[in-house]
Image (spheres, grey):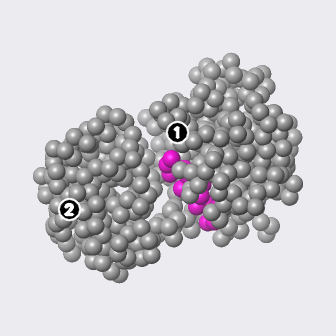
Amino acid sequence: MATTKVLSVVSEIYPLIKTGGLADVAGALPGALAAVGVEMRTLVPGYPAITAALENGEKVLKLKDLFGGPASVVAGRAKGLDLFVLDAPHLFDRPGNPYHDADGVDWPDNPFRFAALSRVGAEIGLGGVKGFVPDVVHTHDWQTGLTAAYLEYDGRTRPGTVATVHNLAFQGQYPKDLLGALRLPPHAWGVDGVEYYDTIGFLKAALRMSDRITTVSPTYAAEIRTGEGGMGLEGLLAGRAPVVSGILNGIDVDVWNPATDPLVPTHYDAATPSSRRPNKSALQKRFGIKVDRRAMVFGVVSRLSWQKGLDMVLAGVESILSVGGQLVLLGSGDRGLVEGFRHAAAAHPGRVGVVIGYDEALAHLIQAGSDALLVPSRFEPCGLTQLCALRYGAIPIVTRVGGLADTIVDANEMALDVGAGTGVMFSPPNPEMFRAAVERAASLYADQPTWRRMMKNAMRTDVSWGRSAARYAKLYEDLVDERSS
C-alpha cells in the first residue's frame, strides 16, 4: 500500500516552542506515524525559536502579500522534525509567547496571523509545494481552523481534511467585518460557513467543513456533544456525530522514561520502584520542604486555572497537611491562584513549596519524586500530566472527566481485589470530593504493599503513541479511500 502523505498544520510544536499539550502532541505524532506508514510534514509559524533551529532550509514557496507583507515557506529539519516554516516576519518575528505579549494581552493581529497560517496550509494542501502533495491536511485547534474553509471555498480538488480539538474552550472568534480582510468570500458568511454567534468562528469553521473531527480522548468526544461540555458548539457536533471520534493522546516514552531520564537524579523502572526514593529527597530539598521519607508528597504541574481545578487544591491545602502530606507545586496562571499558593507556602514553611513559572527539568523531578500527582480538572480533553505520572510511578489523583476517565483505573475495592488500580478518581469536581480523594489516597499510601502494587500497575501501563498512531493511520486511510471512490 502506498504511503499516506499528511500535512499537519499547527501553531506550536515541542521541543521548539510550547505553551501546552498541543505542542507535545504535534511534536510526537510525526515520529509515531512514521512507524505505521504515514509520512507527516508539519507547517508551523516562523517564530524566532523555530527559524533559529531550522537546518538546511530551502525556500519552496513565495507569497507576495500575505496579510500585510511578503512571506515564504521554507522546508527543512529542526530537532528531528520535518517542517515547513512560514517565514512571515511581519506576523511572527516576535519574542516570547506565540499568542500574546509580555502582559498577557493577545496580539491584536492574531486573526490575520493565524488566518495566514491556515491559508498557507490550504495552499500546500492544494499542491503548492513541488514534491509534496498531501492526501490529508490535519489541523489542530482554532489557530488553524480556517484551513478547512480556505480549502472548501477554493473550488479546486482538495485533499481530505481532519480537524483535531485539543480544547474546545478556546474557539477563536473575531468580528464579522473582517470577513473580506481575511480573504473569505461573501458566501462564507452563514450558518453553514464561518458565522458563529454573529462572529467569524475559526474553530467553528473547522468543525463545520472538515471531513473528520477528532478529539484527544473518547470520553471528551462524547462530552463535547452535550450541553454541559459543548460550549456552544454541541448542536453542530451532535449533528456531525458520525464523523466525530476520540483518539487518545500518548506521550513520547523516550523523553519520559524514568530509566534513562537525564533530568532526574536516580533512574528506576517498574521492577525497581524503590530506587526512586532519592528523587523524593531531591524534590523535597529543591522545594525547601522537610526531607521525610514517610511523608506523602502531593505534586502539581499545571496551569493555574479554574478549568484545571487548582482552586480546589488551594482550598484543600489543609486537608493535604492533615493527612501528614506535603505539597509541591509548579505552574503559572491566574493571578489570584498564584498569590493564594504563595500565601500557602509562606503560611506552611517546610510543608508547602511553590515555584511559579515553568521549568521542564523541575517538571520531570516532580514526576519522579512525588508520591501522588494532583490533576483535578473540571474538564480535560486528554491530559498528558497524568500519563507522565503513570510512567514515573506518581499515582494520579484525578476527576472522572474526559481523558482522565479514559487513562486511569480507579483503585476502588473491586479493582484492588483483581490486582488492578493505577490511581484515585473522584466525581463530581468539588472541594468536598477532592478532600475525600486526598484522604482515600492517604489511606492507600499507608498500606505500602498495596501502594507499591499500584505503582507497578501504573508504570506498566502503555502510555505510548503506538495504539493511537495506528488509529490515526486507519482514519487517514479510510478518508483517502472514501474520497477516491
Image quadrant in which you'd find residue 262: bottom left
Q: Amino acid at mark 2?
A: Met
In the image, residue 71 above or below residue 254: above
Q: Secondary structure at mark 1?
A: loop
Name which residue lies at 46% across and 37% down. 229
Visible residue check, residue 453: no
Q: From the image, tell me which residue sits under label 1.
A: 168
Report whether 444 appears left or right of 10: left
In the image, residue 234 above or below residue 357: above
Report the label total.
2
Report whether 89 appears left or right of 22: right
Q: From the image, tell me which residue sits under label 2.
A: 296
User: Gap in Å between the C-alphas at discs 2 and 1?
Assistant: 35 Å
In the image, residue 100 above or below residue 157: above
Question: In the rendered structure, are the residues bearing label 2 and label 1 in contact, judged by CB atoms less than 8 Å apart?
Answer: no
Please say whether residue 22 is one of the residues in the magenta stretch: yes
Which secondary structure class fits the magenta region best? helix
Provide residue 169's location: percent of width, then percent of height.
49, 36
Q: Amino acid at mark 1?
A: Leu
Part of the protein shown in magenta: 19-32
| Mark positioned earlier in the residue sequence (2 or 1) | 1
In the image, residue 114 above or below residue 356: above
Work out whether residue 280 or residue 270 is closer to the camera in this orientation and state it. Answer: 280
Work out whether residue 46 or residue 21 is closer to the camera in this orientation and state it. Answer: 46
Report whether 126 appears left or right of 322: right
Provide residue 331's location: percent of width, then percent of height.
37, 47
Provide residue 39's location: percent of width, then percent of height.
73, 63
